[in-house]
Image (spheres, rainbow, N blue to C red):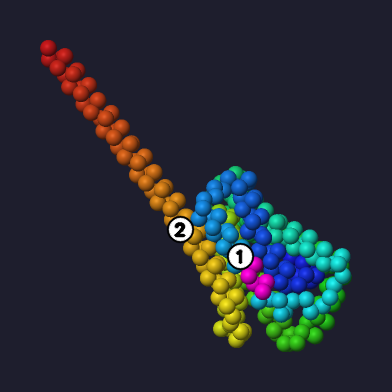
Amino acid sequence: MLYSIGLLYLPVSTYTLICASQLGFNALFSFFLNSQKFTPFIVNSLVLLTISSALLVFQNDSSSGSTKVSKAKNAIGFVCTVGASAGYAFMLSATQLAFKKILKSQTFRVVLDMIIYQSLVATFVIVIGLFLSGEWKTLGKEMDHFEMGKVSYVMNLVWTAISWQVFSIGAVGLIFEVSSLFSNVISILGLPIVPVLAVFLFHDRMDGVKVMAMLLAIWGFVSYVYQHYLDDLESKVRNENVNGVSEVNVSFVGNENVNGVSEVSLVGRG
């Protein structure tokens, strides 16, 4: 809802730039709530992904701000967009905290339960707002006036709902398997790629800004993945060292037992 209000009152360029700040909010919340460790590769990734998203401002300027709004509404849009970015980042970090401290289960069912409960709460709040505002009365008229027809209207709603659920499963699944920050990195990675896909799907004009944004996003993503590779390598070395020490201890204890038995046998024979 906050994102929608922000998009209603702000130019697309400003809105996109503020939305890119959610990665910074997520990093802040992850540090305090999830004990996220920041290495040079992770910081480099966050900076590059934020810059790549901010670059979209320049290619969106031509389509932004077709309607003028008052300064008061502009301020409301700014506050709502910042609140939405911070709120989404906090939700991701809180979800990771819930997995570790409350749910403590390693099953896919837990991921589905988390998505279902969050969606039920959101749906309940939105349905109440729909009826209290009286907008439910205009749904039929809205469908009739849809330029592409009623079938397209319904298909739009259905596939948007399905797409968001698939996104939710992926986002929460990444939080469950890796971290909330990694999940947000994947989400931000998609922002610069969308305009590039629009070139092939909708024949939009390709420019240097889109290419630069995509390359920076990929560079930032690779940097983050490389850090995970280093962490995984370090974890394997640590496990090998622990296993090696355990085998040495077992061997040492075994030799002590054998020597003890031999000594007892010798004493008995004497």
Give the quarter of the image for residue 210: bottom right
Q: Amino acid at mark 2?
A: Tyr
User: Residue sitting at 43 percent across and 56 percent down?
Assistant: 229
Residue 23 appears at what percent x and percent y? 63, 59
What secondary structure prevails in the magenta region? helix
Relative height, residue 245 to residue 270 (above, below): below
Q: Which residue is mark 1?
A: 51
Disc 1 + disc 2, Cβ < 8 Å? no
Give the quarter of the image for residue 261: top left
Q: Which residue is mark 2?
A: 226
Q: Which residues are magenta?
A: 53-58
Q: Observer-nearest residue: 62 or 100?
A: 62
Tell me if mark 1 has few (under 14), some (14-19) or many (20+) residues whose alpha carbon lies within 10 angstroms of its own.
Answer: some
Residue 195 appears at what percent x and percent y? 61, 77
Relative height, residue 227 to residue 76 (above, below): above
Residue 107 appears at what percent x and percent y? 52, 54
Q: Observer-nearest residue: 247 or 74?
A: 74
